[in-house]
Amino acid sequence: MNDYPSPAVPAVELEAVARSFGSRTVLEGVTLQVARGELFGLLGPSGSGKTTLIKLITGIDAADSGTVRLLGERMPKLSMFQRFGYLAQSDALYGELTAKENLQFFASLFGLSGTRRDERIRAAMGVVDLLEHLNKPVNAYSGGMKRRLSLAIALLHEPELLLLDEPTVGIDPVLRQSIWRELLAMRDRGTTLILTTHVMDEADKCDRIGLIREGRLTAVGSPSALKAQTGTDTIEDAFIALGGGARA
Amino acid sequence: MRVRALAIRIIRQFVRDKRTLALLFLAPLLVLSLMYFVFNGQEVKPDLGIVNAPAPFAERLARLDAHIVAYPNPDQAERALADGDLDAVLTFANGQPALRLEGSDPSTNRAVLLLLQQAMQAEVPGVQLQISYLHGKADLTSFDSFGPVLIGFFSFFFVFLLAGVAFLRERTTGTLERLLATPIRRSEVVAGYLSGFGLFTLLQAALIAWYAIGVLGLYMDGSIWLVLLLNLLLSLTALTLGTLLSSFAGSEFQIIQFIPLVIVPQVFFSGLFNLDAMNPWLQKLSYAMPLYYGADAMRSVMLRGEGFADIQTDVYVLLGFSVAFAVLNVFALKKQRAI
């Protein structure tokens, strides 16, 4: 049913994208391509513009200048919301409702119904290991469980592209590993993943990372290339070296 | 389908939130009951002191509905008046009556004057005034008279507050952003909210109207269906206005700040108070206020028994307000999502 564009079309294509709120410039001159099937990480301190960039890619927000293309389509475009899964930075869940009711709600928004909907709910909850808590109200969930439920919601409609804003925030190390295993498995099945993080060892697991600082993309490359380029041993050191030493 | 999913979600959330349900359904009943007891009490019997009254006149007074106390001299009566024991003193000097009122409460003043008028009228034999009513009845209380406005006001006020806070919470908790990261249209968000909340406002409107008329015995001369229709339209206006204004509020507290700006002025212009004495230019402000149309139509139906033909302008204006607020809300959502 979905007319998949040829693999030659990049998953995400940004050209000279700028965005400011009032007099505050949040993003400036961001040009970036993310290939299909890639696991791409946006790394940067908080307030550097990561979330704004993700929102521009989703089409929730629109760029002031420059172009944003998602799977070949010029953004923002309403029908594109069907094509990607999104995990927001804050867990946007309805606490009075059970996990299942939350999932049913979002599944319906994506046009899933009947047995197909129930199948997808069980599959997504299986991925994040929450199947046994399906009928609990979300208010009774721990922080980590809420994060996993949010991730399950992003996976519901089996999108070809996932945009994840800080997916592992507030999740314990064991579970973080299992989520990363799942993210890597999805990448291997051909899903494109773009995520933001400020955890350096997570950045190491990405195919490529983009370093973002004060609204500018300062470097893009594979973790090993960035380390080689700066002659450092860790992403953390590479990040500091590439930031131009501009530390407060 | 998306509208339905959103409506179902809102209904589920609502049913879980017992306190909010209680506020929506029980609070208006409580306040209406209080108003009933305040304004529907027995007629106030004035306390009247008389000094040197001719015997026949004193007898006539005693037959009327008042507490009459006779004082031997004006000084004692004056002291009783000052102490607050009396509302007025009637003194006769050389056959000429003089009335001295306590004076701080206009309604008591009127009651005393009315009482004396009745007593004086009986002096003139033969002339009997025939009294009849086009609308209402002889024992129509103030509660009967502004009850229709109150029904409309409570439907409006509580729905405004709840809709505003609910939509605001959707925004501040981030669920609105999450919701808008799905293929839902902005108009579907507004329609979903209208239908989900609409169900509860419909129930609330029916409950308030039934309670006021069936339990409190509010004077009702027209069709209950028209009352329900008007109440529902008022609630819809409150619902659309509440969600629209919540786009301009940053917190629950800022929603509360809209009450003196948006709700209180509407109360003054709703017909609870007679505006005829007001500057005509200021009177025109009422045309911008939804509650004015709702209250006007409610009174027409309940007090004057008017039919749909008489209130249709009010109905269309209220519908117009709802549609306008809903459309503006669709545009206001652009602030949350570019498309």
Image: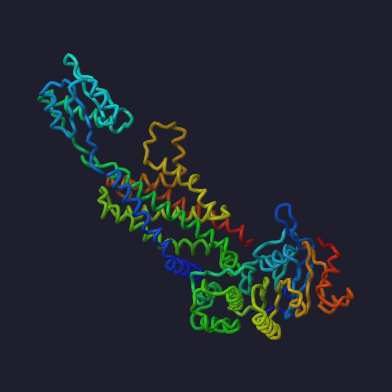
Quarter holding residue B329: bottom right
Which residue lies at the image location 70% right of the left edge and 77% below the top edge?
A: A193
Horizontal side of residue B200 vs A130, given as left or right: left
Seen in the picture, residue B330 relative to A43 is either above or below; the reply is above
Q: Position of residue A67 (x, y in %)?
A: 74, 64
Quarter holding residue B71: top left
Seen in the picture, residue B32 relative to A104 is either above or below; the reply is above
Q: Nearer the viewer, residue A72 or A113?
A: A113
Seen in the picture, residue A18 relative to A144 is either above or below; the reply is above
Q: Position of residue A76 (x, y in %)?
A: 67, 65
Horizontal side of residue B275 vs B192, given as left or right: left
Q: How many marks?
A: 0
Q: Position of residue A19 (x, y in %)?
A: 73, 59
Q: Position of residue B214 (x, y in %)?
A: 26, 55
Which residue lies at the image location 48% right of the left edge and 79% below the top edge?
A: A135
Which residue lies at the image location 58% right of the left edge and 81% below the top edge?
A: A124
